[in-house]
Amino acid sequence: MNIEQFDRDNKGFFKATEKGPVAGRMTYSWAGEDKIIIDHTEVNPAFKGKGVGKQLVLAAVDFAREKQVSIIPLCPFAKSVFDRNEELRDVL
């Protein structure tokens, strides 16, 4: 699984691909200079059940730790990943 990040002005997204096809995408918006809001996570139906959504959230966590920003998970899926994984909550 390859995950790329695209940051454009006050919005951005993480895109997961596997040997070409887009497996999933997670969008976010900047809230000031030190917070991102994850607003939507979408997984290609062909990749359901393969952990793509969680990998996208983990990529956002890595990004937040590297840039020293916090995450506001408005997306219900992203929020559920944080709720189930206490070790990720340092970026909230």
Image (cartoon, grey):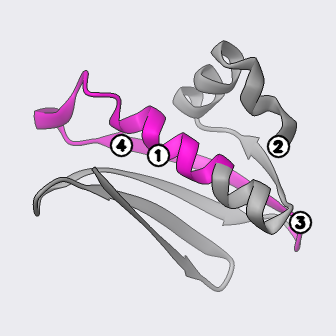
Could you tell me which residue is drawn at 60 percent across and 20 percent down?
80
**Structural distance between the alpha carbons of marks 2 and 3:** 11 Å
For badge 3, the amino acid type reads Asp
In the rendered image, which residue does mark 1 sit on?
Answer: 56
Judged from this view, the residue extending furthest toward the bottom is 9
Q: Nearer the viewer, residue 36 or 17?
A: 17
Q: Is mark 4 on a helix, strand or loop?
A: strand
- First reached walking from the N terminus: tag 3 or tag 1: 3
**Structural distance between the alpha carbons of marks 4 and 2:** 21 Å
For badge 2, the amino acid type reads Val
Residue 15: x and y in percent read: 37, 60
Q: In which quarter of the image is residue 46?
A: top left
Q: Would residue 54 be counted in the magenta stretch?
A: yes
In the rendered image, which residue does mark 2 sit on?
Answer: 91
Q: Is mark 3 on a helix, strand or loop?
A: loop
Q: Give the range drawn in magenta.
A: 32-61
Residue 48: x and y in percent read: 22, 27
Q: Nearer the viewer, residue 46 or 11?
A: 46
